[in-house]
Image: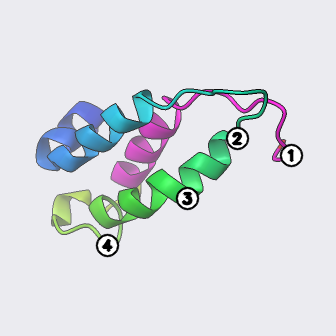
Amino acid sequence: MTFKRIAKIEPRLQALYDEARQVKARGRNFCANQVWYSRFKPQLILLVGWNAENPQLRTPAAYDVAYRTIYRTLPHCRNCFCG
C-alpha cells in the first residue's frame, strides 16, 4: 500500500504530512524525534494502525508506510541527544 492510497482513504494523513513538511529546524538545536513524538505520532496513531476508524488502515503495513513517509519529511536532528 502506498502513502498516496492511504491518504486517499484518510485525507487527514495528507494534512499531517503537509504539516510535517512545514517544520523548520530553526536555531542551533533541533530534535526530529522530540517533534515527532510530541506533535505528530499522537495524531498518526488515531488515523492509521490499530486505532484507525477505517478497517483498511488497521494494518501494520499501512501504519509503517504512513509513519515512515511522514517522519521522513521532518528536518534531520541537529545538536540533540537522541543519537
Apparent side of residue 81 relative to residue 68 in the rendered image (left or right):
right
Which residue carries the number 1 mark? 81
Magenta range is 61-82
Which residue carries the number 2 mark? 31
Instruction: Tell me the tag on residue 38.
Output: 3
Instruction: Tell me the tag on residue 28.
Output: none
Q: CA distance from mark 1 to mark 4?
A: 31 Å
| Mark 2: secondary structure | loop
Tag 3: Cα neighbours inside 10 Å, few (<14), some, or many (≥20)? few
Considering depth in this image, is 26 or 18 the residue closer to the camera? 26
Q: Is residue 79 magenta?
A: yes
Taking 2 as reference, is 67 above or below it?
below
Residue at x 54% of width, y 32% of height: 74
Q: Which sits earlier in the primary sequence, circle 4 or circle 2?
A: 2
Asked whether disc 1 touches disc 2, contact meaning CB atoms under 8 Å apart, the reply is: yes
Which residue carries the number 4 mark? 51
Taking 25 as reference, is 45 above or below it?
below
Considering depth in this image, is 13 or 25 the residue closer to the camera? 25
Taking 48 as reference, is 3 above or below it?
above
Q: CA distance from mark 2 to mark 3?
A: 11 Å
Q: CA distance from mark 4 to mark 3?
A: 18 Å
Residue at x 67% of width, y 28% of height: 76
Asked whether disc 4 touches disc 3, contact meaning CB atoms under 8 Å apart, the reply is: no
Apparent side of residue 29 relative to residue 69 in the rendered image (left or right):
right
- Image coordinates of residue 3 in percent, x first then y, are 30, 35
Give the residue type at disc 3. Ser
